Image (cartoon, helix red, strand yellow):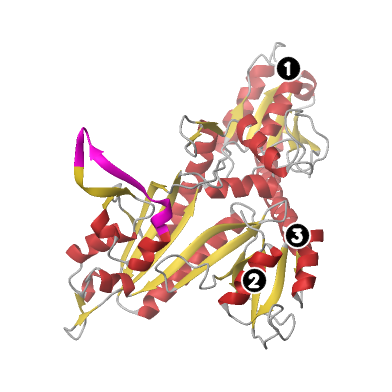
Amino acid sequence: MAKNKNVEQITDMDVDFGQWFTDIVTKARLIDYSGVKGFFILRPYAFALWENIQSVLDRMFKDLGHENVAMPLLIPESLLQKEKDHVDGFAPEVAWVTHGGSEKLAERLCIRPTSEVLFCEHWKNVLHSWRDLPMLYNQWNSVLRWEKSTRPFLRGREFLWQEGHTLHATAEEAEIETQNMLDVYATFCEEYLAMPVVKGKKTDKEKFAGAIATYTVECMMHDKKALQSGTSHYFGDGFAKAFDIQFSDKDNKLAYPHQTSWGLSTRIIGGIIMTHGDNNGLNLPPRIAPVQAIIIPVAAHKPGVLENAEELVTRLKTAGVRVKIDKSDQSPGWKFAEHEMKGVPLRIEIGPKDIENNQCVAARRDTGEKIFIPLAELEGKVNELLEDIQKNLFARAKENLVNNTREAATLDELKSIVNEHGGFINTMWCGSRECELKMRDEAAVTSRCIPFEQKRVGEVCPVCGAPSDIMVVWGVAY
């Protein structure tokens, strides 16, 4: 990561990572604060980033047969109460509507914190036969959770996300769906966001309210903390029984369907910032960046410079590059720092001398390296550089994950690692909730997941000393 700081307004990330993050989201014009705590305004650049995320994921979902729907914003209290574990899990975060206009409502209405019960009420009305299954739905929406402590992207009271909800004839089909959607999130994070993931299953303590099993992709940020970046839940037939959802199976007998749910939110933008950003600002992976290349005319007042710069824009757009030109009257140095702050992967400069030499100059955001590109090779070379930047950002993040994942055999050893290094710590675990809580209370870490890639890092649980066959990843999380 770049250490020299061209934009002095940003706090050094190694001095105060939290303030660095806040500086980034405001100085790069990603968010603004509204008049209500925890409700953030996504400015155009942040929303463009979310639109790119949405576009890629929406295509991946539809390729697997999912359809988009839209559910209501409000949930009657009586409907929310039908699944006890679910309502208990969300009760502290629910916001209520008690009046319509000037009249008090006969029943409180919950502003959706998630939409499981709305889907269940709908499915009860439309599911009749096994021929109706599977029902593979997704919606793009906002939800409201009344968080006490809020931060832009990472923990807002209202946030944008997608929530998938599916219904299946058998437990096996639903479990396959749950795993498939986790794989979608893992592929998306690694191949588009350049964020390496640890895939695994949540412990019972950490699983989603009302779920039989919750699966997760966990990512490590630059400060070595964990970010839960996408989750997929298997509900079994618990919701179906609570809402009396039944269908006629192939034997013409009534059966309960099996349900899944999965989601990824604008929190992932915070993950992109904290995985790739540096002391000069954002550092966006090309495959998701709103602007992949910015054209900077140098000495734009001189004959032919603007015309040649505009020609570069036209050529790169035709080649499928998301490109813009900065024709403002600011100095080149100001423009360089501005687009570096915004994380544009590639800066392309062209001036009178470049025109004479039939070339332009490309500067990589990830390394700062400058490359002279013959104009005849523009399209191919730019796409090649963008692909190399994408791979390099992933390699850096992977190195951070590998170098900051350690093993511990005892609780004291784990505490020492947490205090001296941070990061992820792999230990064996006996499976008891008591030992998991002791990890939290004495070492200030939580279980991130039981990774699918298991290995032995000892023989016993570091808390109680009982023989253990399960490896768990622990860490401090956002």
Query: Relative to residue 458, is residue 116 drawn left or right?
Result: left
Q: In front here: 355 or 332? A: 332
Residue type highlighted by circle 1: Ser
> Which of the marked residues, 1 or 3, is nearer the chain's N terminus?
1
Q: Position of residue 317 (x, y in %)?
A: 56, 35
Q: Nearer the viewer, residue 433 or 244?
A: 433
Per the rendering, the mark at residue 422 is 3
Q: Residue at x 72, y 11 (%)?
A: 302
Q: SS at mark 2? A: helix
At 73% across and 39% down in the image, what residue appears? Answer: 365
Q: Residue at x 66, y 22 (%)?
A: 308
Image position, residue 141 (x, y; %)? 38, 47
Q: Image point 39% across, 52% down: which residue?
A: 113
Please say if 262 is above or below 162.
below
Label at residue 331: 1
- Give the residues drawn in magenta, as a range: 90-104
Q: Nearer the viewer, mark 3 or mark 2?
A: 2
In what element is the residue under mark 1?
A: loop
Tell whether label 2 touches label 3 (CB within 8 Å): no
